[in-house]
Image (tube, rainbow, N blue to C red):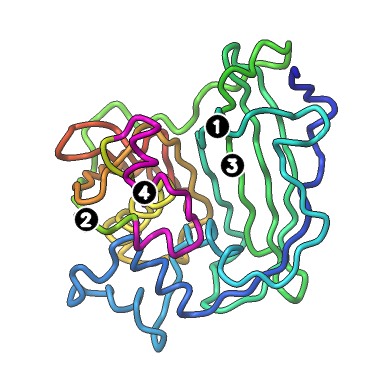
């Protein structure tokens, strides 16, 4: 059934309530590799509740930590005007907007909806949006997740916008490496994404991979942490937003090469696998407060 953006856009995906605390934050940071150099300056601030700071990218898993209630939840692949095979979906881009720095403990209420839908010819691009508010009703963070639905283009919708956050055409201002453990994906999945692609070798083989791969959202968080540490001296409060495109896969045990460019109120980022010299994260940028 062709996608109908006029029917699907703006539809609610429901409201969820959840809570998180310091142990959830620490687990997320461990999933990104925090603590591998536990004596490094500032590293303990990611791992010890007495002095805990929260990486901005934690917003991507905050709603999955401890579910409390769900209201009118709907699967977006079965909405009027948006019916498709979930196996054809790829997570293309992710953006978080921090309306203020994330606290180490919060109870949040998140409203999710279908945003814009674009026609890319051979695929549809569906943007999912979410707004999370704290117990006082104040907006804490917003998210935008861009999903590519292969084989669902050609419905006559508006064309997708050009890619943003192209990095400057010059040498980076900094370049760092971040190693991962062979069990990094098994650790990260404890934050809530239990897709068997990241754990089950037989399932991974069915979709064309020799071994399970790292979650794209793990790569997203690793790049965020590396730049916060190296370019912002570990100051998580300076991040106003963070957006990135998923441009390739990464295997547990490999090493990330992360480059960044300082440009005014933005830091542009690229990440790749050192061993395979293959891109992982591109068109990425942190906007500063």
The mark that comes first in sequence, 2 or 1, is 1
The mark that comes first in sequence, 2 or 3, is 3
Q: Which mark is residue 231?
A: none
> Real-space Cα distance between discs 3 and 1?
17 Å
Is 150 displayed left or right of 217 in the figure? right
Q: Which mark is residue 145?
A: 3
Q: Which residue is mark 4?
A: 200
Q: Which residue is mark 2?
A: 182
> Real-space Cα distance between discs 4 and 2?
14 Å
- Residue at point 65% right, 69% down? 67
For residue 243, above or below residue 180? above
Q: List x then y, in percent, for residue 135.
A: 73, 76
Tag 2–tag 1 contact (CB < 8 Å): no
Residue sitting nearer the eye, 144 or 72: 72
Secondary structure of the residue carrying tag 1 is: helix
The mark that comes first in sequence, 4 or 1, is 1
* Magenta span dominant secondary structure: helix
């Amino acid at each position: 059934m062709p996608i109908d953006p006029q029917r699907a856009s703006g539809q609610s995906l429901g409201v969820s309530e959840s809570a998180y605390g310091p142990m959830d934050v620490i687990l997320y940071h461990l999933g990104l590799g925090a603590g591998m150099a536990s004596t490094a300056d500032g590293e303990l601030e990611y791992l010890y509740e007495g002095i805990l700071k929260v990486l901005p990218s934690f917003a991507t898993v905050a709603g999955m930590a401890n579910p409390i209630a769900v209201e009118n939840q709907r699967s977006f692949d079965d909405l009027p005007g948006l019916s498709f095979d979930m196996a054809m979906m790829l997570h293309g881009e992710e953006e978080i907007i921090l309306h203020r720095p994330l606290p180490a403990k919060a109870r949040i209420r998140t409203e999710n909806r279908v945003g814009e839908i674009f026609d890319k010819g051979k695929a549809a691009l569906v943007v999912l949006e979410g707004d999370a508010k704290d117990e006082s009703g104040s907006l804490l963070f917003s998210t935008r997740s861009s999903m590519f639905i292969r084989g669902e283009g050609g419905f006559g919708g508006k064309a997708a916008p050009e890619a943003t956050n192209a990095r400057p055409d010059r040498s980076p201002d900094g370049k760092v490496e971040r190693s991962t453990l062979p069990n990094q994906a098994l650790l990260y999945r404890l934050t809530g994404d239990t897709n068997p692609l990241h754990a089950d070798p037989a399932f991974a083989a069915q979709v064309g991979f020799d071994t399970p791969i790292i979650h794209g959202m793990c790569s997203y968080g690793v790049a965020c942490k590396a730049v916060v540490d190296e370019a912002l001296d570990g100051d998580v409060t300076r991040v106003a937003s963070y957006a990135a495109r998923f441009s390739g896969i990464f295997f547990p045990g490999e090493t990330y090469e992360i480059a960044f460019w300082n440009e005014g109120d933005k830091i542009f980022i690229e990440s790749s696998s050192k061993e395979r010299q293959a891109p992982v994260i591109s068109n990425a940028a942190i906007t500063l407060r």
